[in-house]
Image (tube, rainbow, N blue to C red):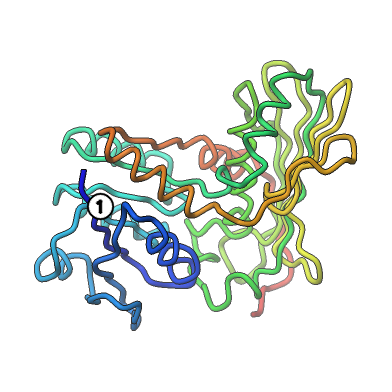
Amino acid sequence: MSIIRIGIVGVGKIARDQHVPAIAADPGLELVAVASRSHADVGVPAFDSLEALLADGPDLDAIALCTPPQVRRETALTALRAGKHVFLEKPPGATVGEVGDLSALAAEQGVTLFASWHSRFAAGVPAAKAWIAAHQITSVDIQWREDVRRWHPGQTWIWEAGGLGVFDPGINALSILTEIMPREVFVTDARLQVPENVQAPVAAHMAMTDIAGTMITADFDFLQTGPQTWDITVTAKDGRLRLSSGGARIEIDGAPVVQAADAEYPGLYTRFGDLIRAGKSEADIRPLALVADAFLVGRRDLVAAFIE
């Protein structure tokens, strides 16, 4: 297949910081246009909407959707109906069910749908998965704490219904968890701290397990100042593994094993290109389902208003 021509819809921080440079670095891909309600000067033609891009823009093969999840479904439907391959920034949708509809339409249209989970492409994740497969795991502890004001400035959508709140970064940890665990994980309890002036939690605690009874806990916090924490500690009967820096680093029994620079989005786009060329789709909803279950069973505690 010739070079895959891509358009980006929604040119915000994540698109500028990650998508644009990842596409530029891949010799099999080319960014040919963008659509965004905000001014989007990234060196290619820009349009106000996907519809305008499809009507008046250059020929393209695929669309990467970087819009907030609440409005992503309709945009994805438009792209799929136009016969374009679709890359969904995480989370893949505002609901679990809508991703199933998109998958069915992609199959009907004969195009690729890729629900991307960038943290699965962190350098340490494959090695962690292999280590876990070779050990009898007793517990997993997730500590995912970051400063929302630093990483999501002015992004009010994240606090609205469907915006996930602290689960927007927390789902990255859950995407790693569902990738490295050998058995399916399910939620047994949750506690959500919701500021009185918004719709989504600013902090959360989850308890999970699997059919083997593994004790799995996760603590998410959006108000972490100072050093940021993205750690997963896995305890086995005969050792301990720690994934840190969002999965980029591994320590086994305290000894460093994997330490690598960030290459998550280049890995995502390599995978997207491979799926397109193979005529396949990949739309794993398990991380989103865990978040949905936390909302279903979670107790809600009202906390002080969030003021940016």
**Where 295 falls versus 59 (above or below)?**
above
Q: Residue at x 38, y 36 (%)?
A: 282
Location of residue 254 by image quarter: top right
Q: Residue at x 36, y 43 (%)?
A: 114
In the image, is 305 to the left or to the right of 88?
right
Q: Secondary structure at mark 1?
A: strand
Image coordinates of residue 112 in percent, x first then y, are 27, 40
**Where 151 falls versus 176 (above or below)?**
below
Q: Closer to the camera, 200 or 28?
A: 28
Q: Residue at x 73, y 65 (%)?
A: 303
Location of residue 6 by image quarter: bottom left
- Amino acid type of the residue that numbered disc 1 sits on in the rendered structure: Ile
In the image, is 26 to the left or to the right of 231?
left
**Where 96 falls versus 260 (above or below)?**
above
Q: Residues within 10 Å of mark 1 (few under 14, many from 20)?
A: some
Count of numbered tags: 1
In the image, is 209 to the left or to the right of 86?
right
Q: Residue at x 47, y 53 (%)?
A: 266
Query: Residue under circle 1?
Result: 4
Q: Closer to the camera, 184 or 164?
A: 184
**Where 28 falls versus 54 (above or below)?**
above
Image coordinates of residue 56 in percent, x first then y, are 10, 71
Spot the residue most to the left: 55
Image coordinates of residue 3 in percent, x first then y, are 24, 52
Q: Quadrant of the N terminus?
A: top left
Image coordinates of residue 234 in percent, x first then y, are 79, 33
Q: Closer to the camera, 206 or 174?
A: 174
Q: Quadrant of the C terminus?
A: bottom right
